[in-house]
């Protein structure tokens, strides 16, 4: 809000405003992603899944968890690998001269938690498939 007022009224925006808002967007999104997956409040293709039997829905859940888990797990692993290099090279934002490694570490931990949540959901789907599709 401050950046908008300064840019509009005084033609003098905060030079680091866009960068900080990007950092905050990453924090807000990834801190809520694991909870969203746990509560099943993420976007789903309901028009497709309602046509499946309970076993089919669980198979779909299992495939989704495995595919998402592979991608999220590799992304988390890559972020953990990059943190030491970021510390060593002293990477900072362009305008906002704050070290970027804490944000990258937060991202890696958030992705790891999401990976673990997907693993738990995959195990639940396997159990439900073995029980004949009951939840």
Image (cartoon, rainbow, N blue to C red):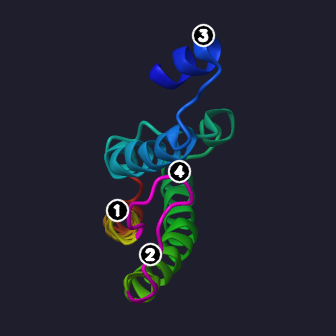
Pair 4/3: label in front = 3
Specify whether 87 is left or right of 94.
Answer: left
Q: Residue at x 65, y 39 (%)?
A: 51
Residue 5, x across and y down, in percent: 53, 14
Instruction: Name above or below for residue 50 compared with residue 83.
Output: above
Upstream in the sequence, badge 4 or badge 1?
Answer: 4
Residue 95, x across and y down, in percent: 54, 53
Judged from this view, the residue extending furthest toward the top is 9
Quadrant in the picture for residue 87: bottom left
Q: How far is the residue under mark 2 from the one under mark 3?
A: 42 Å
Label 2 sits on residue: 76
Numbered mark located on residue 9 in the image: 3
Q: How far is the residue under mark 4 from the one under mark 2?
A: 27 Å
Q: Residue at x 61, y 35 (%)?
A: 46
- Camera-side residue of 73 and 61: 73
Label 4 sits on residue: 57
Mark 2 surroundings within 10 Å by alpha-carbon count, few (fewer than 14), some (14 through 19), many (20 or more): many
Quadrant in the picture for residue 106: bottom left
Verify CB contact (< 8 Å) between mark 4 and mark 1: no
Q: Which residues are magenta?
A: 88-100
Instruction: Name above or below for residue 88 compared with residue 86.
Output: below
Residue 65, x across and y down, in percent: 49, 64
Verify CB contact (< 8 Å) between mark 4 and mark 3: no
Numbered mark located on residue 110 in the image: 1
Mark 4 surroundings within 10 Å by alpha-carbon count, few (fewer than 14), some (14 through 19), many (20 or more): some
Q: Secondary structure at mark 4?
A: helix
């Amino acid at each position: 809000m401050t950046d908008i007022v300064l840019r509009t009224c005084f033609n003098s925006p905060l030079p680091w405003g866009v960068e900080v808002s990007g950092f905050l967007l990453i924090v807000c999104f990834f801190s809520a992603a694991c909870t969203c997956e746990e509560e099943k409040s993420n976007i789903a293709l309901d028009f497709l899944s309602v046509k499946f039997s309970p076993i089919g829905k669980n198979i779909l859940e299992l495939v989704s968890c495995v595919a998402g888990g592979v991608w999220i797990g590799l992304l988390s692993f890559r972020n953990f690998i990059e943190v030491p290099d970021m510390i060593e090279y002293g990477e900072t934002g362009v305008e906002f001269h704050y070290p970027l490694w804490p944000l990258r570490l937060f991202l890696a931990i958030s992705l790891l938690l999401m990976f673990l949540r997907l693993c738990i959901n995959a195990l639940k789907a396997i159990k439900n498939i073995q029980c004949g599709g009951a939840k």
